[in-house]
Amino acid sequence: MKLDSLIPAPLRKPAKPGEGNGAKGAAPADLKTAPPERPTDTKKLADRAVEAPVDALAWVDQRTAASGFLTGMLFRKVPKGTNWFYTLGSATLFAFIVQAITGVFLAMFYTPSTTQAYASISHINNEVFLGAFVHGLHKWGSSVMVILIFLHMGRTFFFGAYKYPRELNWVIGVVLLILTMTMAFTGYLLPFDQRSFWASVVGININGTGPVVGPYLSDFLRAGPELGATTLSRFYAIHMLLVPGAIIALIGAHLYLVVKLGTTAPPWLKAKKPKAAAPVSQLNASANGSDK
Amino acid sequence: MSDGADKQNGAEAAGRPERPQPKPPGYFEGESMTRRHAFTIAAQGLGGIAGAAIVLPAVGFAVAPIFHRGKERWEAVGPVGDFVEDTYRQVVFTETEGIGDAGKTTAYIRKSSKDLGEDPGQIVAVSNRCVHLGCPVRYVEAAGNFICPCHGGVYDFQGKRIGGPPVRPLDQFQTRIQGGQVEVGPRYSVTSQLEPVRARDPGEFTGGIWEYLYPPRPSTFPPPSS
């Protein structure tokens, strides 16, 4: 309860019904017998210091009215049986945040040019302080994100959490999966070593085998008939500008629907049977207002 | 144009004699569209034009490379005397400029052979790019075949597919002889009968109906007329 005093009133967890805060207005018994000492200056200062963050939060809340949304989101009900499998979506989000942060720092050292890309990556790995660690997080983190997003998808499928009214969230999730794979594909070329070069050649050629539009899609991806300098900068722009923006926007929509619609109970929990209905005669009696 | 308030007012006044409705500002006899409606359409139209002015050039910028054909490039790879009829000589030359070693490609070059029913006096340049998914194939002298290390594609001496997943014969490069030097030029693909067609990417069939299912791209050069 001590912590509650640090949280502005609108953000506090609402009290459960029947659990009042005690009688209001009545002075405590000891106040009547022994009036409190006058607070010293030090005590006043300390009180004000404690109040300061609360005041700051209240200042923001008065101007945004965000507390209603935040309490609704943070203290929303979750069904019985919610378990660790329900954290896979948050884990995927965490993996994405790691990718975003490490990606920003990698971009500070990386040069998207065919002649300098490989050299800049080896510079990051061998000379920049903790560069190998940040690059490693980004490289292995991408695989972690792909694995987690599939596990999250599997959880949603096997728990039946894609059914009405959550179909749209499934659709958004599938688009997010495709965008994640696009990130993995475009990011693979960026180190521009032999492996990433030939993997991208093969990947683009697989894409080109789609009838009618395939050949044009390949030209679009390569920005020309052969994999070249513009391919690398194109992949770089897709990898760090286009797709991340789309992913962030869609994650926003995805989370909004999760909060709006709530989560599902695991399928092994059966719905409670409704209590036996009251006899019809009783229903009629109360409907006629017979108690008056 | 009447909104909810108008209707409500009309309903209240139903019992009383009709009062003339005040005309909206700028009303004239026989107008077909209210001022407000006209301005709404104009504002939306202007917004659409402004949006298109930003989006269309950006999209065009991104898709323009599909319709752009680079400069035709020819590179001398050695005197005519270097090449024979019964085996290939491997040459490395630049196919895409400006990206260093990544822009280089390999061709296997020989003189045309009467024994195989080819026109005499020509130079045949076979690309080493596997037409399955683009891995580099290698000419194996002992077998007289091209073999791909990735998924086991096998091509015969002329580059026709004889095994594995490839979908057509190996691509070729245009060749010409200038001042005793053999020069290689743009890439082109061939049908299963070795008839030249415009260059296709690996994995795409050539000939017959496939010419329509995998249409030629504007970024490639026309095939040599045979």
Image (cartoon, coloured by chain):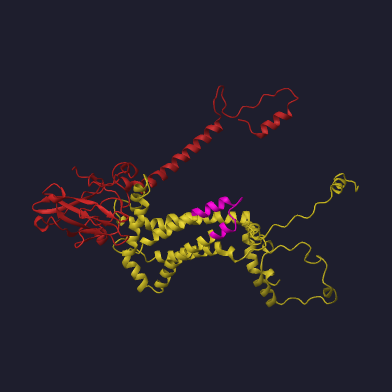
Q: Is residue A112 magenta?
A: no
Question: Image quarter for residue B90?
Answer: bottom left
Q: A144 or B42, which is in the foreground?
A: A144
Residue A157 at least partly seen: yes
The structure residue drawn at horizontal position 77% and vertical position 77%, both measured from the top left corner, is A37
Question: Image quarter for residue A13?
Answer: bottom right
Q: Which chain is depicted red?
A: B
The structure residue drawn at horizontal position 79% and vertical position 63%, both measured from the top left corner, is A18
Q: B41 or A183, which is in the foreground?
A: A183
Range of magenta residues? A154-175
Q: Is residue A95 left or right of residue A62?
A: left
Residue A232 at least partly seen: no
Give how far across and how far down residue A244 sits, in percent.
Answer: 46, 57
Give how far across and how far down residue B188 sits, in percent.
Answer: 24, 48
> Which quarter of the figure is the N terminus of chain A placed in?
bottom right
The tint chain A carries is yellow
Q: Is residue B168 left or right of residue A277?
A: left
Main secondary structure along the magenta-highlighted residues:
helix
Q: Is residue A157 magenta?
A: yes
Q: Is residue A199 left or right of residue B11?
A: left
